[in-house]
Image (spheres, rainbow, N blue to C red):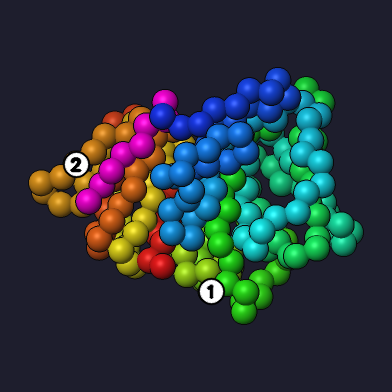
Amino acid sequence: MITTRSASACGLADFGWLQARYSFSFGHYFDPKLMGYASLRVLNQEVLAPGAAFQPRTYPQVDVLNIVLQGEAEYRDSEGNHITVREGEALLLSTQQGVSYSEINASKDRPLTRMQLWLAACPERESPRMQKIVLPAGQSTHLLASPDGVEGSLQLRQQVWIHQIELAPGEQHQLPLHGPRAYLQSIHGSLSASTGADHQEKLSCGDGAFLQEEHQIRLEATTPTRALVIDIPV
């Protein structure tokens, strides 16, 4: 089963220094029916004005994945760790209790645009505190994060696989799924998603889709498309 969630139905914020779209309840946006999806707790697309910053804050026990779409971000924690992440790169923060984290748009003249995901972390698992990878250009599918860090992916503290899909118009890709739940997020472009011959959904820029009890998903782009498939078996 595929159930779409249009970008227009998501929560919105505009604070001047920050513009955001929230797929699930976050901040001032609250919907008791949308508190996350399995271990996927947060999925935001946010734009920070030049020089804008999130002040130091703590997190619940989650892995925080930031995918920089435009600009350059600096991340610091209260233990003295520091890292810069640029367009075309992704950062995973394995957040810790009692540690605060800050984020700043490092540019004084360009906005910072990024996707941010929070995934519930298993308390018995350990991963590096800050992990960064460069996303390959011109590759139709790339394993962005996984439980074991295979294929050079970021290592999560949860049984979740996150794939980035980039397709040209008319190009197709079929992806097997590990378990009963997955979430599809269009970052930009228009595409169709199907799990069989009898069920197809169309998504546009910013749309998402819940997948339940499916073993695979087939994507076909109608325009240049970039999307995430978040495979969440538990």
Q: Position of residue 30 (x, y in %)?
A: 53, 38
Element under label 2? strand
Q: Earlier in the sequence, mark 1 or mark 2?
A: 1
Quick one: which residue is furthest to the right in this view? 80
Q: Amino acid at mark 2?
A: Gln
* Residue at 59% from the left image edge and 45% from the top image edge: 116
Residue 110 visible in image: no
Q: Nearer the viewer, residue 84 or 167?
A: 84
**Stretch of the chain drawn in magenta:** 1-8
Q: Which residue is mark 1?
A: 148
Give the label on residue 102, or none. Answer: none
Q: Is residue 199 left or right of residue 168?
A: left
Q: Are marks 1 and 2 in contact (CB under 8 Å)?
A: no
For marks 1 and 2, give the one nearer the viewer. 2
| Residue under the image location 66 percent in, 71 percent down | 127
Q: In the rendered view, does 135 fall on the left or right side of 208? A: right
Displayed quadrant of residue 29: top right
> What is the C-alpha distance between the residues marked 1 and 2?
32 Å
- Does the magenta-highlighted stretch encompass residue 109? no
Residue 200 is labelled as 2
- Kind of residue sitting beneath label 1: Asp
Q: Residue furthest top?
A: 16
Please tell me how crowded label 1 is: few (under 14), some (14-19), or many (20+) other residues with Cα within 10 Å: some
